[in-house]
Image: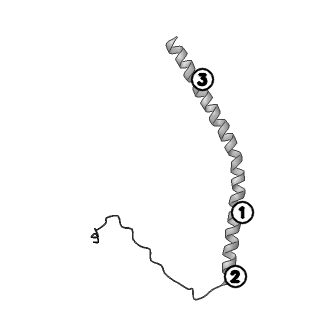
Amino acid sequence: MLTPKLPSFFRKAGYKNFEYTPIYYKPTKDEKEMRKRRMKMEVSKARAGVYNVGNKSRQQSNIRLILIIVALVAIAYYIIYL
């Protein structure tokens, strides 16, 4: 015996697939787009290397800030309770 199908409020809509073939195809345009993508990837990789240098100074700054906060809390504790 089959169970009856209940309506679902959370049903996902199916995706519609379209098969579109362009009328005009320019291989040179396609090559240009591929070159642009490769160049953007290379530039982003180069920039990632530059930004990694800043992470070290940011880490040192964070450590310094934590040490200052700990020192201030210790001084406040000393003043209040002693």
Image-based side of 73 in relation to 59, left or right? left
Q: CA distance from mark 3 to mark 2?
A: 65 Å
Element under disc 2: helix
Counting from the top left corner in percent of width and height, residue 9 is at: 31, 64
How many numbered marks, from 0 up? 3
| Kind of residue at badge 2 | Thr
Pick the residue in front: 12 or 58: 12
Residue at 65% from the left image edge and 39% from the top image edge: 59
For marks 2 and 1 on the same chain, the one whose residue lies earlier in the sequence: 2
Binning the other alpha carbons within 10 Å of mark 3 as few (below 14), some (14 to 19) or many (20 upward) gives few
Residue at 69% from the left image edge and 54% from the top image edge: 48
Element under disc 1: helix
Judged from this view, the residue extending furthest toward the front is 1
Q: What residue is pinned by disc 1?
A: 42
Counting from the top left corner in percent of width and height, residue 71 is at: 60, 23
Q: What residue is pinned by disc 2?
A: 28
Element under disc 3: helix
Counting from the top left corner in percent of width and height, residue 41 is at: 68, 63
Q: What residue is pinned by disc 3?
A: 71
| Kind of residue at badge 3 | Ala
